[in-house]
Amino acid sequence: MADSDDVNMEDDGSLEVSTVPVAEEVDEEWWDLKMQWGGKVFDIRVGGNDMVYDFRERIASLTSIPPDAQKLIGLSSTVKGKLNASHDAMRFAHLGVKNGGKFVLVGTKVEERFVDPIKALREGEGAGEDEFDVDYKGKGPGNDPRNKRKIQEIIDKVPITVMNAPREGKKLLVLDLDYTIVDTKPLLNGALPSSECARPGLHDFLKLVYPHYDIVIWSQTSWRWLETKLVELDLISDSREYKISFVIDRSCMFPVFSQRNGQLYKHEVKPLAYLWASFPQWSAKNTIHVDDLSRNFALNPGEGLKIRAFNKAGSPDGQRDRELIKLGTYLVGIAASEKDFTTVNHKYWSGRGRRGRH
């Protein structure tokens, strides 16, 4: 990372970055390639604005060979052998690949590789992930044609499983789970009872906002961990005076790439357009996304509300946490007073003024 003198930080501690420029603004070129592997030939179609990351992931989806094990022979005269993580933020159009070209893949399928079970467990929990946060300077990643394609792919491939049907006339509240409404670390390692891991006032908060909002939980973890957390926190019990409409896991997120002074950053996002495509009664006008990391709503910054991370469960500071009390009051207030949330600047939700998003 660049020296501190060269990095601008927002007042919430996030790093100010910019998007990676698109390769082709208007008429995007497409590459039709043939890949040979295991005695078979695969057809691969790649857009010029796609990232090298997308290309490597596409190969992985076809062959089960993870990106770090892929060796590509004959793909490009400028990149010989392995494409690696340092190439991920490069647009495919800049890779120097000949349209209609052929290349050979060499690598070992993931099920044939040795995997450290402890490392796999930590990755499943999201442990050790770099929790940096970013704030976009100028044009954000929402209009990137590559990102729009990724959203449509999720819409087409991943249907939403509804637990409790959305109610007519209700606004949409999208809640992050980890470190927004629960301190995840003691919950997973059993250091504290589940009730003490929940952010103070959690169930009262959900009961308060439920008359105004349908509630969706979107977690940046895999489904097996998400399901465990929901059960242990007693969030999906029939006895509660609120209902969760549905839950979404990490499979409906994808990475975007940004840059700052030559340093590349990669982080995943939660695209609200995925929800709006299935439920057209919701839009930017009546949706709010609460998260402890603003990078998660980088595609929808106007709908995002950043809350202070809750990571001190069991301590005196954790017990004194009142964020959900303040947040509940704010959400109920704007639900009653604002017909169009696009006129509200959620950055100042905690009392520093609300209006004037633009």
Image (spheres, helix red, strand yellow):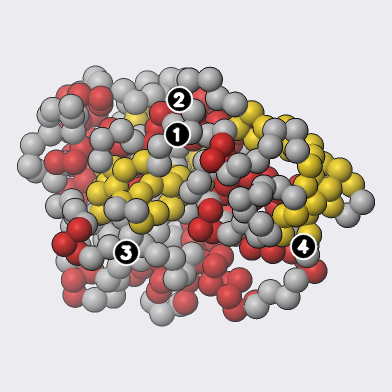
Q: Farthest residue in the left direction?
A: 352
Q: Amino acid at mark 2?
A: Glu
Of callouts 3 and 1, which one flags the residue occurring earlier in the amino acid sequence? Answer: 3
Circle 2 is placed at which residue position?
25
Q: Are marks 1 and 4 in contact (CB under 8 Å)?
A: no
Disc with the residue nearer the chain's start (1 vs 4): 1
Q: Earlier in the sequence, mark 4 or mark 3?
A: 3
- Amino acid type at mark 3: Met
Residue 224 in picture, x, y percent from top left: 60, 59
Residue 252 against residue 193 in the figure, above or below: above
Marked residue nearer the N-terminal end (4 or 2): 2
What residue lies at 30% left-to-right and 71% top-to-bottom? Answer: 313
**Mark 4 or 2, which is nearer the eye?**
2
Q: CA distance from mark 1 to mark 4?
A: 30 Å
Q: Is residue 278 left or right of residue 282?
A: right
Secondary-structure class at tag 1:
loop
Position above or below: 162 against 62:
above
Mark 1 highlights which residue?
22
Residue holding disc 4: 107
Q: What is the x, y in percent for residue 349?
A: 16, 41
Q: Earlier in the sequence, mark 3 or mark 2?
A: 3
CA gap between label 4 and label 3 equals 32 Å
Report the residue marked by disc 3: 1
SS assignment at label 4: loop
Q: Residue at x 53, y 53 (%)?
A: 87
* Image quadrant in which the N terminus is located: bottom left
